[in-house]
Each structure stands twice: as C-alpha cells, then as structure tokens.
Amino acid sequence: MGGHEILDCFEHRRDGAWVCTRPVTLTTPRESVAIRPGMRFDYGKKVGGVDLAEYLERLGSQFGS
C-alpha cells in the first residue's frame, strides 16, 4: 500500500477526528499496529509513536482526502 492509499481506510470527520472505515495495518519504525473499523483518532493520539490524525491530515492536504 502506498503512503497515501491509507486515506482510503479512514473518514475525516467535521470535528477533525479520523475514523477507520476498513481494516488496515499501520507499520511504523517502532511496530505494526492493526487498526479496526470504528477506531477513532484525534490529534495527539499516538499509534506506534505516530500522531495518526496529524499524519492523515498531512497526506490529505498532499493527495486529497
């Protein structure tokens, strides 16, 4: 999966949170994390050492969300 393809697994909510819509495995330098549908990520919530909401926001601004 290319870096920006992870956007297809999340929905960006009006309140700024990102919610998983399809199962995905996030692989970071620290670990691999299984993310399940319904899991919500707000700014500041780190997964494998990565602020996932911030990461998805950056990707969305580059590739469209």
Image (cartoon, rainbow, N blue to C red):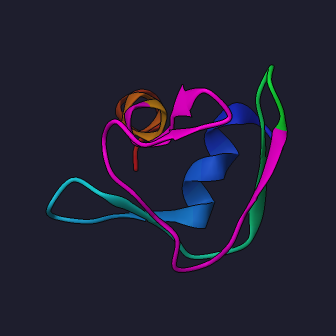
Number of numbered discs: 0
Extreme residue toward the top, this view: 29
- Residue 28 point in image, percent of width and height: 76, 28
- Residue 50 point in image, percent of width and height: 56, 29
Residue 45 quadrant: top left
Q: In which quarter of the image is the N terminus?
A: top right
Instruction: Decide which of 24, 46 is in the foreground and name it.
Output: 46
Residue 2 quadrant: top right
- Residue 6 point in image, percent of width and height: 65, 49
Task: Left or right? Give the position of 63 relative to 28.
Answer: left
**Residue at point 83%, 34% (across, down):** 31
Q: Is residue 33 magenta?
A: yes
**Residue at point 67%, 47% (across, down):** 5
Instruction: Decide which of 45, 12 is in the foreground and name it.
Output: 45
- Residue 22 point in image, percent of width and height: 67, 75
Task: Relative to 17, say whether 62 is above or below.
Answer: above
Q: What stretch is highlighted in magenta?
A: 32-54
Task: Relative to 15, say whether 30 is above or below.
Answer: above
**Residue at point 35%, 31% (across, down):** 61
Task: Relative to 19, say whether 26 is above or below.
Answer: above
Extreme residue toward the left, this view: 15
Residue 40 quadrant: bottom left
**Residue at point 62%, 38% (across, down):** 4
Q: Does the magenta stretch include residue 28?
A: no
